[in-house]
């Protein structure tokens, strides 16, 4: 298993914030020296029966802390996301038994083992409902867990353990594989060496709400003072734990400029509304250091606060000679990203589309005398009556349409 280290308050950071600085969620802090799953299980064995009302994520956090991963989360979803830096998250193979949906332990070898945190997820709700700690397996080969909220003492996990919680549809079970503890010896998941990896002049979306379509520029310099950084990976993870954008750059250098390496590739203005996690990892000598880890939120803009201007300055109209070229020009402007620009020429009598182009620019301004002009081949139109049309909309659902009839003779 790769060694993974998370650097939190020990690195030198200078955070810069942009846009409306409304706080969405508190950022989580997770930090690992070495993880010893046996210590986490020992804690679970001694504390599973303590006061446990609505306490499942906090209980698992305390177990992990006892094992060496310093994480403090009361929310199930936040805990799941906080642990992404420490191991691979996997959807577990499940099996229906007469008692309900459960997890055959050996069929998930390599994805979960004793000491790993386990999460019950509702796809229809897009929500993580319950957190437990894997204890191993019972004499029938099914996974057992320790848990609060629905108390478990090395007992079989069932998806329906969350029946008293609000959810709909089929449930799924995920694990974050931070250990390979089947022998009781534990596994080192990385020794913190904060003095060897620093970040300065960081520009990252930390605890802010970005309006959908808002641009955000990344920046910062990652430095390894004791060796060479092999690669830097930046990724944006959604609230389900899925990586929605990612870029890895192989640099073979002691420093990495995040503005050059990541900013052109992680496009914040393309994100749909929701909760996200921004992570930057530096790979140095086989050790993966999580050097940036922040939460942010994307909120849908209000149509009442948006506008859209479509100004077409050159377009076919009236009667045009057959075979003559004609240029399209104009601009589209909005305070929010343009999600679509569509242009076409179609025959009035038959509705046949002669030419068209559909673009998702995700910019706040777009000029027609480029890709649209090149696509509108008026000189190739046959004789007849036509409509030239441009449609556009932004992420706030503001729309605009321009049409012009013309005739080719």
Image (cartoon, grey):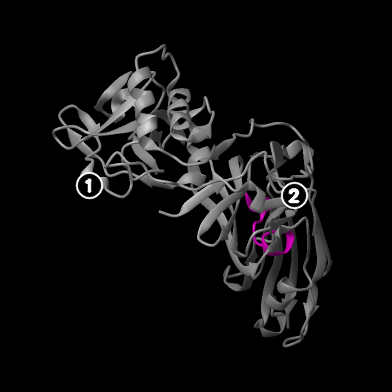
Most extreme residue toward the top is: 51
N-terminal of the pair, mark 2 or mark 1, is: 1
Is residue 105 shown left or right of residue 32?
left
Q: Nearer the viewer, residue 56 or 32?
A: 32
Bin the neighbour count of mark 1 within 10 Å (Cα to Cα): few under 14, some 14-19, many 20 and up. Answer: some
Is residue 10 shown left or right of residue 159?
right
Q: Nearer the viewer, residue 403 or 148?
A: 148
The residues colored magenta run: 259-271
**Image position, residue 171 (x, y; %):** 34, 34
Is residue 250 shown left or right of residue 56?
right
**For the point 42% across and 28% down, which residue is it?**
63
Determine contact: label 2, label 1, CB under 8 Å: no
Which residue corresponds to mark 1? 107
User: Within the image, what quadrant is residue 301 found in?
Assistant: top right
Q: Which mark is residue 202?
A: 2
In magenta stretch: residue 100: no
């Amino acid at each position: 298993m790769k060694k993974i280290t998370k650097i939190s308050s020990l690195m030198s950071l200078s955070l810069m914030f942009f846009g409306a600085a409304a706080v969405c969620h508190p950022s989580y802090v997770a930090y690992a020296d070495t993880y010893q799953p046996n210590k986490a299980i020992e804690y679970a064995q001694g504390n599973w029966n303590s006061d446990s009302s609505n306490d499942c994520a906090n209980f698992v956090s305390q177990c992990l802390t006892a094992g060496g991963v310093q994480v403090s989360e009361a929310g199930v979803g936040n805990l799941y996301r906080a642990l992404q830096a420490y191991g691979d998250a996997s959807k577990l193979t499940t099996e229906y038994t007469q008692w309900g949906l459960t997890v055959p332990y050996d069929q998930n070898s390599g994805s979960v083992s004793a000491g790993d945190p386990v999460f019950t997820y509702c796809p229809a709700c897009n929500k993580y409902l319950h957190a437990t700690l894997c204890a191993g397996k019972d004499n029938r080969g099914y996974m057992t867990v320790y848990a609060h909220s629905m108390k478990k003492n090395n007992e079989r996990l069932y998806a329906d353990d969350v029946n008293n919680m609000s959810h709909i549809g089929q449930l799924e079970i995920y694990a974050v594989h931070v250990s390979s503890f089947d022998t009781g010896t534990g596994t080192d998941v990385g020794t913190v060496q904060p003095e060897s990896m620093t970040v300065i002049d960081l520009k990252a979306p930390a605890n802010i709400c970005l309006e959908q379509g808002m641009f955000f520029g990344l920046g910062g310099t990652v430095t390894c003072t004791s060796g060479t950084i092999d690669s830097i990976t930046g990724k944006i993870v959604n609230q389900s734990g899925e990586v929605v954008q990612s870029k890895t750059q192989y640099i073979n250098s002691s420093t990495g400029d995040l503005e050059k390496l990541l900013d052109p590739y992680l496009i914040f203005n393309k994100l749909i509304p929701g909760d996200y996690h921004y992570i930057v990892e530096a790979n140095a000598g086989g050790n993966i250091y999580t050097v940036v880890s922040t939460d942010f939120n994307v909120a849908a803009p209000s149509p009442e606060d948006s506008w859209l201007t479509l100004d077409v300055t050159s377009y076919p109209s009236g009667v045009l000679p057959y075979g003559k070229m004609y240029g399209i020009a104009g601009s589209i402007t909005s305070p929010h990203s343009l999600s679509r620009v569509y242009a076409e020429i179609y025959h009035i009598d038959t509705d046949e589309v002669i030419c068209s182009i559909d673009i998702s620019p995700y910019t706040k301004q777009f000029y027609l005398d480029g890709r649209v002009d090149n696509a509108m081949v008026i000189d190739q139109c046959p004789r007849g009556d036509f409509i030239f049309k441009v449609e556009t909309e932004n992420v706030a659902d503001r729309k605009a349409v321009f049409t012009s009839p013309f005739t080719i003779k």
